[in-house]
């Protein structure tokens, strides 16, 4: 995040020359629109790619035509080193930060952009493929057993992802000071810092907390540093850890840490959790995102053919 000195110098420059440079626009966006360091990294990458495409053109002079041509270039592979077309989801990832930037800057209270060129640009339609990206109970056990063979830390990481449904970026951001008890000290909770630095409280199941206290006995003491990372690893390191376990235990599914988040939601709903409970636990901003899992669960529990069979089975 930018410090106040940098912002002050930029405001002086803007006041003196009456215009905004592209660097100033991007830096002021991040200063006024805080995000997690992972989101900032991805947004900067998307902004840099688009700015390379428009060259010396000011972001304020961009029209929908430039954005549309940029989108088509991504879709047809004209902007990559290998000339490989980007999938609709990847194109959407490149366009989304631009949409956020222009929506923020064209707000009447901000007034950086005279218009928002993204209002006329449609994001490619993305098919929902994640609804089947979950593990069965038996597959979860196989994966956990393999992680335990790799080490106690690996087992604890996998179990944390499965039981809490965290994003991998949220897992690596966990600090010891984020744990706390409820007012009656009957259960443990974790303050999770999710997308856009949004906070939510996730309950720690007793089994998981017991494993934490066994693996980190010094850290359970009040004298432990509250800002100490619980898992000081990179996102890539944890992705590789899950991949290795998946390969060694013979799972055919392309399991990733995010699959474990999907698994958490699916198993929770299958075993009686409400839609609202899952939404709050996973930190979904919109209930529609959580409902995707509900549709999967409803299909698992009883699909349309089951109802037809029930009505006919006595006659067949």
Image: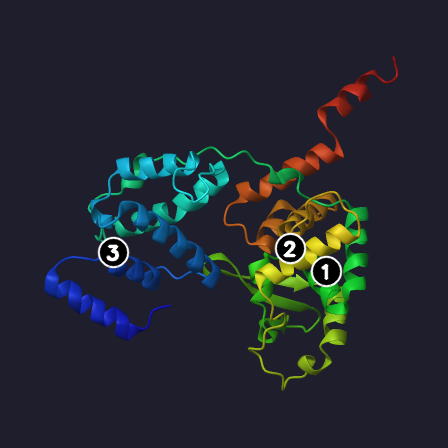
Left or right: where 148 falls relative to 23: right
Q: Residue at 64% of width from left, 35% of height from top?
A: 295
Q: Residue at 35% of width from left, 61% of height from top?
A: 30
Viewer-nearest of labels 1 and 3? Answer: 3
The answer to whether any part of residue 102 appears in the image is: yes
The residue sitting at the top extreme is: 315
Q: Quadrant of residue 297?
A: top right
Identify the residue under disc 3: 22
Which quadrant is home to the C terminus?
top right
The residue sitting at the front extreme is: 82
Q: Residue at 33% of width from left, 64% of height from top?
A: 31
Is disc 1 placed on a helix, strand or loop? Answer: helix
Q: Position of residue 99 (x, y in %)?
A: 35, 45
Q: Earlier in the sequence, mark 2 or mark 1?
A: 1
Identify the residue under disc 1: 159
Q: Position of residue 27 (x, y in %)?
A: 30, 62
Which quadrant is home to the N terminus?
bottom left
Q: Earlier in the sequence, mark 3 or mark 2?
A: 3
Q: Position of residue 179 (x, y in %)?
A: 62, 72
- Return the residue nearer the eye: 229 or 236: 236
Q: What number of labels is visible? A: 3
Identify the residue under disc 2: 165
């Amino acid at each position: 995040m930018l410090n106040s000195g940098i912002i002050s110098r930029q405001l002086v420059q803007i006041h003196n020359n009456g215009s905004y440079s592209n660097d100033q626009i991007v830096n002021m966006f991040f200063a006024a629109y805080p995000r997690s360091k992972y989101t900032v990294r991805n947004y900067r990458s998307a902004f840099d790619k688009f700015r390379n495409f428009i060259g010396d053109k000011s972001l304020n002079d961009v029209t929908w035509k430039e954005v549309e041509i940029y989108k088509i270039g991504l879709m047809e592979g004209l902007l990559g080193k290998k000339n490989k077309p980007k999938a609709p989801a990847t194109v959407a990832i490149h366009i989304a930060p631009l949409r956020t930037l222009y929506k923020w800057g064209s707000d009447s209270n901000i007034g950086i952009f005279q218009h928002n060129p993204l209002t006329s640009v449609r994001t490619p339609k993305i098919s929902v493929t994640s609804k089947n990206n979950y593990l069965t109970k038996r597959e979860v056990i196989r994966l956990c057993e393999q992680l335990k063979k790799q080490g106690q830390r690996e087992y604890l990481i996998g179990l944390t992802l499965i039981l809490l449904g965290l994003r991998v970026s949220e897992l690596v951001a966990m600090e010891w000071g984020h744990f706390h008890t409820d007012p009656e000290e009957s259960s443990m909770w974790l303050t999770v810092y999710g997308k856009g630095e949004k906070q939510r409280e996730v309950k720690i199941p007793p089994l998981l907390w017991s494993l934490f206290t066994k693996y980190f006995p010094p850290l359970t003491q009040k004298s432990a540093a509250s800002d100490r990372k619980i898992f000081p690893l990179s996102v890539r390191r944890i992705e590789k850890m899950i991949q290795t376990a998946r390969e060694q235990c013979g799972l055919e599914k392309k399991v990733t840490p995010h699959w474990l988040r999907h698994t958490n939601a699916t198993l929770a709903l299958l075993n009686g959790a409400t839609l609202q409970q899952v939404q709050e636990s996973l930190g979904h901003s919109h209930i529609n995102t959580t409902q995707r899992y509900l549709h999967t669960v409803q299909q698992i529990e009883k699909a349309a053919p089951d109802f037809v069979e029930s009505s006919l089975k006595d006659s067949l």
